[in-house]
Image (spheres, rainbow, N blue to C red):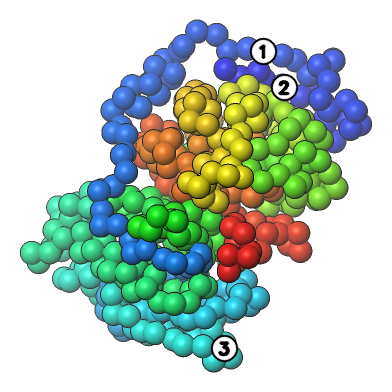
Amino acid sequence: MFTSAVFLHSPLLLPPHRRRCSGPWFAIRSSSAPNLVERSAEAAEERRPVIQPHDSTPLPAITAAKRVVLVRHGQSSWNAEGRIQGSSDFAVLTKKGEAQAETSRQMLVDDSFEVCFSSPLKRSKKTAEIIWGARKEEMITDSDLREIDLYSFQGLLKHEGKEKFGAAYRQWQVDAANFNIDGHYPVRELWARAKSCWARILAHESRSVLVVAHNAVNQALVATAIGLGTEYFRILLQSNCGVSVLDFTPREEGGSPYICLNRLNQTPGSPVASGGRKTSKRIILVCHGVNQTNAEADFPISGDGPMNMLGIIQSQKTAELLLDLKVSSIVSSPKSACIETASVISRVQEAADCLGADCVPRYVDMKELQDLDVGDILRQSQKDTSEDPDFHPLWLNGFEDRAITELWAQSGKAWRSLLEELADESDPEKIIVVIGDPAVHIALMGHCLNLTKEWMGSFHVDAGSISVLDFPDGPFGRGVVRCINYTAHLGRWSIPITRSTVNEEDF
């Protein structure tokens, strides 16, 4: 379980050589036997079904690596009014929406897109035109990229939908996958349309594709690409002009390609700002900054070396991004770079409460969790893939099956510990920052989504990135993924949003 470091005075005053020691500047305590919260976490886990790979139509084979960048349209006039849009075409971009589209254009300006697929609806087409700018390459309008068809709901303000449709509106909110209106199942229809879109997108000869569409359809595109069913509607958040990136890699034997979600919902604004369902419980996964060991690593693991200068900059940038949040606790792997990153975030959090004349320091509870350290498991089982005909560039395939099984089991223990921490009733607005290696964060996201270990190769995160998990129904309800692998906060040191995770020579 946890080892907790409770600061006795501000770590702003601590010299670097004392920030990891077990001397008088912090007190150690350990958790004991399973408590009521722990038993609740285990019971909740037993109730939640584990999702097996979705039985869907395989995606078409490809002959070369392909990157697809999905963008939701900017804020529309009906977004601003709180009106249900669906596939209606009356809304237009607001000034804010146009500015968001311009920010997305700047995010993607260096990408040499070969084609743009766009929804035919005005709000999406306008966003696509702003992002596409002066490019001369082809733009294709695809009607299946229109927003979800909501039939009689369309055009209503949300409170009008609740008043007019009662039980149907309630089902739309809590059980959208089985929601029925006017004889239709909108989410099921949407998933079928998304699969149809993938057939055309992947059949196009281009290797770098921009797709500009809508909230629900982009959720469906991400979910159907990696094999998730309609029960994942509203779980993979898509903000206005949020950018998601999928990498497709061909298999030597043909068939459906390998698929990796490189990034989810990199937004023009802060990834921790409001939007989506209101939540008082949140886990923020922070990948530690680059250290000497993983600076040139091929896999998402690292040794126990301290951060290099880039890593220190990355951790400081992350701390600044979290400045406006009141972090309740920081849970860290015991590895050196993770503890360094935790200390930087803690110092900035404490300083945030001391900017006025009356300084009352707020001490952030820092804890080490041994189960977050999976580096040794992976390092001891790396396979020699130089002559492996079945090797593919997704990181998961670089390790022996027993290691992946062990990683999954250990990360599951860490996940249960984090849910227990999140359930602490003494802090109703609980925000936990979790610091570890990319590999363990990928596993934690898999546990959040109730997946199995086979899914870990479907996600990618970079050093210095953050991923945000919200729990609007409490720590034992379903988690909502607000973003994955967000790096825009790193500024000039960020990972380019369109950089491929596969060998550049494949492009």
Where does residue 103 sit, x and y in percent of width and height?
60, 74
Q: Looking at this view, is 229 or 503 the one in front?
A: 503
Which quadrant holds the C terminus?
Answer: bottom right
Residue 304 drawn above or below residue 246: above
Residue under label 2? 6
* Circle 3: residue type: Arg
Q: Residues within 10 Å of mark 1 (few under 14, many from 20)?
A: few
Which quadrant holds the N terminus?
Answer: top right
Q: Which callout, 3 or 2, points at the residue further toward the start of the chain?
A: 2
The residue located at (61%, 45%) in the rendering is: 386
Where does residue 98 sit, x and y in percent of width and height?
53, 81
The residue located at (8%, 64%) in the rendering is: 183
Label 1, secondary structure: give it. Answer: strand
Where does residue 97 sit, x and y in percent of width and height?
50, 77
Query: Can residue 346 be seen from the camera position used here?
Result: no
Q: Which callout, 2 or 1, points at the residue further toward the start of the chain?
A: 2
Q: Could you tell me how far apart the alpha carbons at marks 2 and 1 are, in whole angstroms?
A: 9 Å
**Residue 29, label in figure:** 1
Q: Could you tell me how far apart the alpha carbons at marks 1 and 3 are, in whole angstroms?
A: 60 Å
Q: Residues within 10 Å of mark 3 (few under 14, many from 20)?
A: few
Residue 76 drawn above or below residue 262: below
Labels 2 and 1 touching (C-beta < 8 A):
yes
Residue under label 3? 135
* Circle 2: residue type: Val
* Circle 1: residue type: Arg
Q: Looking at this view, is 301 or 288 the one in front?
A: 301
Residue farthest toward the left in the current orientation of the protein: 183
Label 2, secondary structure: give it. Answer: strand
